[in-house]
Structure formats: C-alpha cells, structure tokens
Image (spheres, helix red, strand yellow):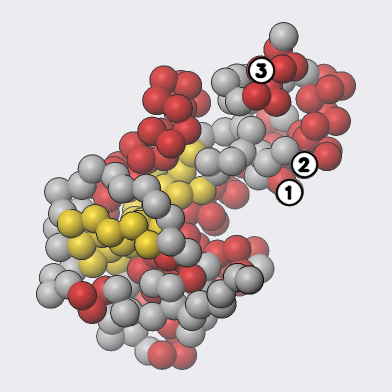
Amino acid sequence: MSLNFIPSFEFEKQAKGPVVGLDEAGMGCWAGDVFAAAAYVPQTLSKDFLNQIHDSKKLTAKKRQSLFQTYKEMGIQFFVAHASLQEIEQLNIRGAALLAMERAYQGLGIEAELALVDGTMQPKLPCQVQAVVKGDQRSYSIAAASIAVKVSRDQYMRELDVLHPDYGWADNAGYGTKKHQQALDQIGISPYHRRMYRPILERLK
C-alpha cells in the first residue's frame, strides 16, 4: 500500500541555514543524458503558491511548465545540470546521476547547510546531505527541483526528437515504450542511445 504524502518544509526546518533540494531525471531512459536540478525555495512563499508545488510526476506537463516559468518571479532559485552519454558509460548511470547532482548544486551557487536529495542517493557536497525516500512528495525543495529537472529534460528530448523523430522521444522522453522498441527493431540505434543498457546492448549484438 503506497502512502500519499503532501509536501511541506518539515525537513527544511531541521536546519538553521539555507536548504536546497536535489532531484534527477532520466536514469531509467534508454537514450539521452541524465539530468539533475538543485532548487532553493523561500519558506516565505504564499501557501496558495506552495500548494501547487508537488512531485513532478503528479502534475500535467502543462502545469509543470506553467509553474517552472514562475520560479524566478516567485524567488525560487534553481540550476539544472546534466551528465553526458560518455559519462554514463564511464561511471554507470548512478555515478553519472550523482555527478549531475553535484554540478547542479555547484551551479546553484548557494552555500547550503543541508541538501535534501530525492530517493537514496547521496552526492558528495560541501554540506550535510540527507536522502529522503519519496522526497519529491514530502519536501517543497525537492518537489521544486523535480519540476525543474523534468521540464528541462523533456525539452532536451524534444530537441533530440527533431533529429531522430522515429523513436517518439518527444512523447516518451527516451523510456522504453512500445514505439521506441519498434523503432529500434526497425531502424537500429542512434548516436544518442545508451549502449551499455541491456535493451540496446542486445540489439547491438
């Protein structure tokens, strides 16, 4: 039975100094870079606005985009980073996602006391790091990062879709959907596929 959480500042309030949230997108995809975002959400934001911030997977694409476009005017600071296909191959996907998180934190430029990270991963950062399972449903900071990273990576995959439209990346973001699998069987792999992933490796053989 899955629990339904509502984001709050419960975890953020444990720290006296600034707290940032971190999340990744694209670890399970068969193609494209892996992305990560870091976000700082002021605890002074209106409740009406905060009530809209949630796990990106629970929001429509239109709602995610709309919220993301208001970040700067609302005072939410964020930075989105990525790790390349080559880095995924060198470090494995978990190592590459951690690298992307570290880059996102550095790019944000906030000396945080605490970094809240969705899931179980703990990037090496110059502050305390706390992994929070289902953090994108429990922390405003992580939820804001989840929206930023999802919107950014989806846009990146739409751009790749223009170059390679047969795989349906504009819709599936690189995940192994039926259309994606059929295209792989019919036309083979692209330069953007993750060659160490089993479904791609099997087709290469």
N-term-proximal mark, 2 vs 3: 2
Q: Considering the numbered disc 3 on the image, is that residue within a helix, a strand or a loop?
A: helix
Q: Residues within 10 Å of mark 2 (few under 14, many from 20)?
A: some
Counting residues from the N terminus, which is met first, the one under dot 1 or under dot 3? 1
Q: Is residue 51 left or right of residue 106?
A: right
* Residue 25: x %, y % from top left: 51, 48
Q: What SS does tag 2 mark?
A: loop
Q: Amino acid at mark 2?
A: Thr
Report which quarter residue 23 is drawn in: bottom left
Residue at 43 percent across and 36 percent down: it is 94
- The quadrant of the image that shows the C terminus is top right
Identify residue type, mark 1. Asp
Left or right: 28 in relation to 5:
right
Q: Spatial distance from mark 1 to mark 2, Cα to Cα?
A: 10 Å
Height in image: 134 above or below 179? below
Nearer the observer: mark 1 or 3; the answer is 3
Label 1–label 2 contact, CB within 8 A: yes
At label 1, counting other C-alpha atoms closer than 10 Å, the crowd grade (few under 14, some 14-19, many 20 or more) is some
Q: Dividing the image into 4 quarters, which one contains the N terminus?
A: bottom right
Asked whether residue 78 appears in the rendered view, the answer is no
* Residue 200, placed above or below residue 55: above
Mark 2 and mark 3: Cα distance apart in space: 17 Å
Q: How many marks?
A: 3
Q: Earlier in the sequence, mark 1 or mark 2?
A: 1
Q: For marks 1 and 3, give the CA distance.
A: 23 Å
Q: Which residue is mark 1?
A: 171
**Which residue, given by chain and number where applicable, does mark 2 sit on?**
177
Q: Kindly report which numbered mark, 1 or 2, lies closer to the viewer in this rendering.
A: 2
Residue under pointer 3 = 201
Quadrant of the image occupied by residue 57? bottom right
Q: Is residue 132 visible?
A: yes
Disc 3 marks a residue whose amino acid type is Leu
